[in-house]
Amino acid sequence: MLNSVIVVDDEASIRTAVEQWLGLSGFDVQLFSRAEDCLAQLPAHFPGVILSDVRMPGMGGLQLLEQLQQRDPDLPVILLTGHGDVPMAVEAMRNGAYDFLEKPFSPESLLGSLRRALEKRQLVLENHRLHEQADQKALLETTLLGMSQGLQQLRRQVLDLASLPVNVLIRGETGSGKERVARCLHDFGPRAEQPFVALNCAAIPEHLFEAELFGHESGAFTGAQGKRIGKLEYANGGTVFLDEIESMPLAQQAKLLRVLQEQKLERLGANQSISVDLRIIAATKPDLLEEARAGRFREDLAYRLNVAELHLAPLRERREDIPLLFAHFARSAAERLGRTAPPLSGAQLGRLLSHDWPGNVRELANAAERHALGLGEPQPLLSEAGQSLAAQQEAFEAQCLRAALSRHKGDIKAVMEELQLPRRTLNEKMQRHALLREDFLDRA
C-alpha cells in the first residue's frame, strides 16, 4: 500500500508532532514550511497525499489546493483548519479537497483520514496504470502487426522489457524488422523523450569506426578538423541501436565493453572521461556466442549485450500474418501515392502464402508496394511453385481462424457464427492448427 505523505504547515511544532505520529505508524513523511516550496519540489504523479494548513504566510492552503487541482485533480489534499475556517474548508471540499481536520485533532482522526485517502490514491493510480497499459498495448498492435502466436508473444515481451533498464539483444534474419522492434523498446519506455540513435555496424569502414562511435577532438588524427560528438555521446540519456553488431571490429568491441561497464567514454584525442547514461539494443543474425567461440566476437561483450534476448521469427514461420501485413503495406503505399490498391485475387493470396520470403517483411513490403502501383506481381511470386495446394489451403485456413478469433477476442460462439462452423468442427480445426482460445482473450 502507498504510504507517502507531504505535510505543509508554517508552524514547526505542528510539523514535528505530525511527523512523529506518522513516522511511528510507518508513513514516509516529507515536510515543508511553505506551500511554494511544496509545489516546486512535488514530483509528477506523486503517489501519496498532501496534508496542508489553510492559513500560512504567502500561499495558503486553498491556493495550494487550486494549484494542485490543475496539476492532478485526483491527488488527495487534506486541509488543517482552525475553528473559524470550517465553513471555508467545507467549501474547499466542494472544490476538490479530500477532507479537512479541525485543530486540535487527535492522531487517530489524522491516521484514519490519511489511510482512507491513500486507499483512494492507490485505486486511482492503479486505474491510470491499467489504462496506460491498454493504450500502449493497442498502439503496439498497430506498430508490430501480426496475429500469429509468435507476434503476440513478441508484443508482450516488448511491453515487459521496454520499461526495464537492461540491454537487449534482438536476433532475426535480414528484413525481419529488428530496427522496428528496437524502436518500440525505446518508444514505449522511460527514455522515449531522449535520443534514439541507430548505427549499422556493417556499413561503417573500420578506420572510421572509433571516431563515429566515440567522437574526436580537433586534430586527433589527420583530417580531424574541429571537435565531433560521437554517436554514443549524442545518445546520452537515450538508446543506441547497434545493428549487425557481429560486424563491429574487435578493437571497438573492447572499448564498447568498457563504456558499458563504467558508463564513461573518451573522445579520440582527449584525456577527459565523459559520463554517459545509455541503453544498448543490439541486433544480430548469427549467434554471438558461436561467433565468440570462433574468435570473431568478444564473449564478455556478448554476455553484456544479451541481458535479455528477443527472437524474431522469419516470415515463412508465421505465414498467417502475411495477408494482414501485405494489406497494410499496400494500403499505405496507395495512400501515399493518392491511389487505390487493387484487391487481391484468391490465386494471388495463395502465391503470397506459398512464397518463402527470404527477404522477410522487407521483401513483402516491396511486393505490396508494387501491387499498389499496379506494376504486377513481383517475380518471385510467379516463379516459385512453393507449397502444395493442400499446404496452401492449410495455411489459409489457419489465417482465417486466427483472424476470426482475434476479431471476436476468443468468443467461440461468435467465431462459429461468422465462419458457419459447428462447435465440434471448430474445435478440431483449432486443435490441428494449435490455436488456443486463451491466447485471444481481451486482458486489457
Image (cartoon, grey):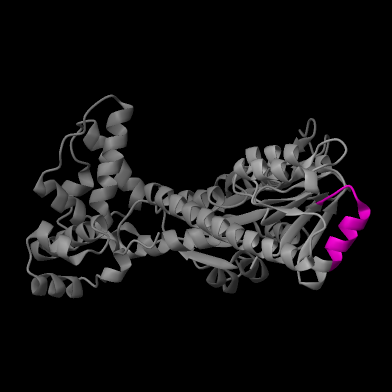
> In the figure, is residue 282 to the left or right of 19?
left
- 328 relative to 80, above or below: above
Please identify the quadrant where the C terminus is shown: bottom left
Quarter-wise, where is residue 257 in the image?
bottom right
Task: Pick the residue in front: 55 or 28.
Answer: 55
Left or right of 14 in this view: 172: left
Viewer-proximal residue, 93 or 343?
93
User: In the image, residue 16 lies at what x, y percent?
Assistant: 90, 60
Give how far across and how far down residue 307 sits, in percent. Answer: 60, 68
Q: What residue do we see at 28% from left, 24% from top?
A: 338
Q: Is residue 121 left or right of residue 151?
A: right
| Residue depicted at 19% across the width and 75% down the height | 431
Q: Is residue 43 above or below residue 26?
A: above
| Residue 367 within the magenta-colored segment of the rendering | no
> What quarter of the picture does the N terminus occupy?
bottom right
The spot of residue 425 in percent (x, y) is: 9, 72
Is residue 361 or residue 357 the one in the foreground? Answer: 361
Furthest-right residue in this view: 12
Which residues fall within the magenta stretch? Answer: 8-20
Where, by quadrant of the figure, is residue 376 drawn?
A: top left
Is residue 282 something one can see in this rendering? Answer: no
